[in-house]
Amino acid sequence: MAEKRPEQRRLNAFLRDDRGATAVEYGIIVMMIGLALLGMVSLTSVANQIDDTFNYVSDTLSR
């Protein structure tokens, strides 16, 4: 069996290294929570605009 070249050994070691995986997973979780919060804020804004529109139409029709 032929001995692996140093570059191949370093590449294999890099591909097997999983020390940063947990940090990446936590980063993804934080990003998803942030997106959920941003979505809730924007949906609240849209809901308020729709409510204002219906109130305007209702007030206009009741005159």
Image (cartoon, helix red, strand yellow):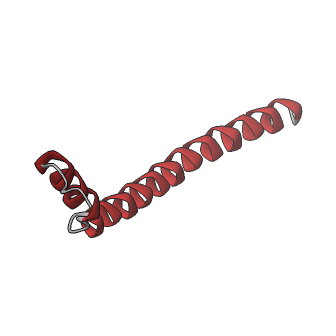
* Left or right: residue 35 compared with residue 14: right
* Left or right: residue 29 compared with residue 6: right
Please tell me which residue lies in front, 10 or 58: 10
**Residue 51: x and y, percent?**
69, 44
- Toward the front, the furthest residue is 1
Q: Toward which corner of the image does residue 29 lie, by quadrant?
A: bottom left
Q: Toward which corner of the image does residue 15 lie, by quadrant?
A: bottom left
Say which quadrant the C terminus sits in.
Answer: top right
**Residue 36: x and y, percent?**
49, 56
Q: How many marks?
A: 0
Say which quadrant the N terminus sits in.
Answer: bottom left
Please tell me which residue lies in front, 25 or 13: 13
**Residue 14: x and y, percent?**
21, 56
Which residue does the image show at 37% across and 55% down from the upper left? 31
* Left or right: residue 11 compared with residue 29: left
Which residue does the image show at 15% across and 46% down from the upper left? 7
Please tell me which residue lies in front, 43 or 27: 27
Which residue does the image show at 70% across and 40% down from the upper left? 50
Q: Is residue 61 above or below residue 13?
A: above
Which residue does the image show at 64% across and 46% down from the upper left? 47
Q: Toward which corner of the image does residue 62 lie, by quadrant?
A: top right
